[in-house]
Image (tube, rainbow, N blue to C red):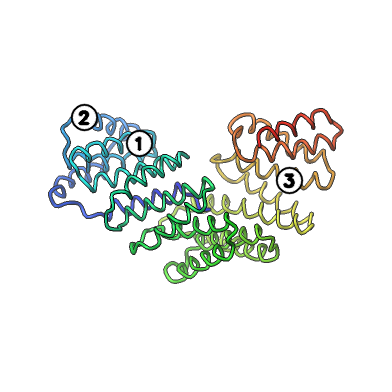
Amino acid sequence: MVDMNRNLKSIFQFVTRSVIIPSSTRLWLITPILLVAFYPLAAQQNVDAVIYEMEVIERNEPTIADVERIIQLASVLEDSAVYGALPRLFQLALSKSRSLNYDYGIRLALTKLANEYSLVGSYQEAASYCDSLLARKEPPDSLQKIALFIKGTAFSVLGEFSEAIHSLEEALTIPVSLKDELEIYDYLSYSYSGLGRYDQAVQTCFTALDLLKETNPEGYRHFSQFYHNLGLIHLKNSEYRKAIQYYKTALNYNLEYQEKGEPEESIDNVIGFAISKSIPLYLEIGQVYKNLQMIDSAIHSFLKAKELDKQVGPRNREIRRAAIGISLANVYNDQKDYELAYKEQFPLEEYFAGKLSNYTEHVRFLISKGITLKGLGRNNEALETLLAAKAKA
C-alpha cells in the first residue's frame, strides 16, 4: 500500500486551498494568509506564536473568522512538521463551529480530526469522526469523499475488509476528483485481496493503471505501486510466475522514478522514496523464489533488500530490518544453516523487546527463532520460545 500519511496530507492541502470561502469572511482571511506565507520566524517561533494565538481564540466569543483562522494556524504547524497540537486546534474549530452552527466548519474539522487520528493509528476513532460527518446527510462533495476514503483505509488497515470495500466503493461514486484519487483504488485492491476476491483486486489495479495512462503517464511511482499490488495479489493466489513478472515491472518503474523523479520533488526525496519502496519488492520477490524452491535467487533478493536498507533513513527502520532478518533466517532454517539463521535473528532481539513488542511479526520471529534453536540443539530454549509464540498468537 502507498504511504497514507503523505497522501492524506496532500489531499487536505488540495481541499482547503480549493474551497470557496464565504464572502463574509474572504476579506478577513487576506491578512492571516499573508502572515502565514511571510512569517519571518524560525520553526519554533512559529509554533510558539500559533499556540499563543490559539489560546487567545479559545477565550474569544465564537466567530466564523476565528474558525477560518484556526485552519490557517494548522497549516503553520503542518509546514513546521509539528503535529502534536493539531488535534487540539481542530477540536477548537469543531467546538466554535458547533456553537455557531457553521456547517462547513463542522464538516472540515470532523474530517481533519479523522485524518489526525488515522495518522497515529487510532483507526476506530478516525472512523467515528468520519461517521459523524457522513451522518449529516449533506450533498456529496470533496469532504464526504475524503471521509469515506479515510474510513475505508482505516477499516482496511484493521483487516475489516468488507467495511473498507463498502466505504471505498461509495467514495468512487462521488463525482469529485481528488488530487490523490488513485489511493482509493490502492486500498480497494488491497481490501479485495484481503477477502480473497483476487479477480476484483486485479481489475481494480488495471482500472487505476488505465486512469494513470490517461492522466499522468509519467507518474512512475504510481505505476510501480499498482504493479507491486498486482505482484502481491498473484503471490497470495500462488501464481508465482505472474507475481515475478509484475514485481519486476514495478522495480523498473521504481528505477525510472529514481532517475527522472516528478515535478516539484527534490532529488533526495525521490531517491529515498524509490529505494524505500524497492525494499518490500525485493522481499516479496525473494518469497516467490523461496516458494519456487529457487533458494539462491531467494537469498540474493533478501540480501539486496538488506543492502538497500542501509541507504534509507531511520523512519520505520526497525520494521524493515525485522522483515529482512526474519526472511533471511527462515530461508537459512530451510537450508539447515542454523548458525547463519541465528546471526540474522540476534540483532532483532532488541527490536522485539522494545518498540516492536506488539508488532504483528513478533510471533513469526519467535517461531523462526524456535526452529533455529532446535536446530542448534538448544532444545529447552527452543521449547520456551515456541511456547512464547503460541501464547502471543
Between 259 and 381, the one lying in front of the other is 381
In the current view of this chain or complex, which residue is farthest to the right? Answer: 377
Foreground tag (1 vs 3)? 1
Q: Which residue is mark 3?
A: 328
The answer to which of marks 1 and 3 sits earlier in the sequence is: 1
Q: Residues within 10 Å of mark 2 (few under 14, many from 20)?
A: few
Image quadrant holding the C terminus, namely top right
Numbered label attached to residue 185: none
**Residue at horizontal 45%, vertical 56%?**
166
Query: Amino acid under label 2?
Result: Val
Q: Which residue is mark 1?
A: 87
The answer to which of marks 2 and 1 sits earlier in the sequence is: 2
Residue 51 place in picture, x, y as percent: 29, 31
Mark 1–mark 3 Cα distance, whole angstroms, equals 41 Å
Q: Which residue is mark 2?
A: 56
| Dot 1: element | helix
Residue 58 place in picture, x, y as percent: 22, 30
Tell me where residue 312 sits by quadrant: top right
| Dot 2: element | helix
Above or below: residue 112 compared with residue 236: above
| Dot 3: element | helix
Residue 208 place in picture, x, y as percent: 48, 65
Query: Amino acid under label 1?
Result: Pro
Mark 2–mark 1 Cα distance, whole angstroms, equals 17 Å
Above or below: residue 227 compared with residue 317: below
Between 358 and 351, the one lying in front of the other is 358
Mark 2–mark 3 Cα distance, whole angstroms, equals 56 Å
Is residue 244 found left or right of 67 in the rendered image? right
Query: Amino acid under label 3?
Result: Leu
